[in-house]
Image (cartoon, helix red, strand yellow):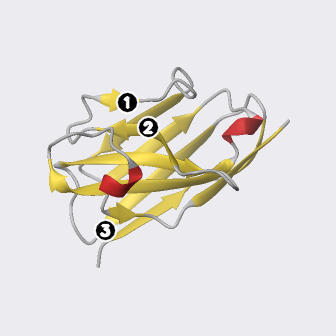
Amino acid sequence: QVQLVESGGGLVQAGGSLRLSCAASGRTFSSSAMGWFRQAPGKERELVAAINWSGGLTYYPNSVKGRFTISRDNAKNTVYLQMNSLKPEDTAVYYCAARATQGGSYYLPAYQYDYWGQGTQVTVAS
């Protein structure tokens, strides 16, 4: 059974930092793109970071560019999201996602990801 388990969420003051981790089990994703999404109440799920299979290519929307950094450790089957200079508008549930397909594109909409974690809450207080 494939599982993605996120950790590292919590409450932080504006300007602070958090590091999210997503540990995968049940299969290896070392050849697959992975991403981090977030969903705030009443809003659609949005991609905040994506990384290709090797870690050599990354994507960020303008809303987080320069503040968030995605990375991966294929030996540990784990992907990370370092979030700095957090803002209240970053408050959301953050989800890790992985593609089943090897290689291919990496910055993709949510429906093209095959596996999802349960989510971890990030709350940024003003």
Q: Is residue 90 left or right of residue 94?
A: right
Which of the image's four quarters has the C terminus?
top right
* SS of the residue under disc 2: strand
Q: Amino acid at mark 3?
A: Ser
* SS of the residue under disc 3: strand
Q: CA distance from mark 3 to mark 2?
A: 21 Å
- Mark with earlier residue (3, 2): 3
Q: Is any atom of residue 8 visible in this view?
A: no
- Mark with earlier residue (2, 1): 2
Q: CA distance from mark 2 to mark 1?
A: 6 Å
Q: What numbered label is drawn on residue 49?
A: 2
Q: Nearer the viewer, mark 3 or mark 1?
A: 1
Q: What numbered label is drawn on residue 59?
A: 1
Q: Amino acid at mark 1?
A: Tyr
Q: Nearer the viewer, residue 80 or 62?
A: 62
Residue at the image point whose x is 67% and y is 39% from the top: 90
Residue at the image point whose x is 48% and y is 29% from the top: 61
Residue 75 spot, x, y in % from top left: 24, 50
Residue at the image point whose x is 30% and y is 62% from the top: 114
Q: CA distance from mark 3 to mark 1?
A: 24 Å
Residue 40 spot, x, y in % from top left: 66, 51
Q: Is residue 97 above or below residue 35?
A: below
* SS of the residue under disc 1: strand
Q: Nearer the viewer, residue 63 or 44?
A: 44
Dots 2, 1 in contact, CB < 8 A: yes
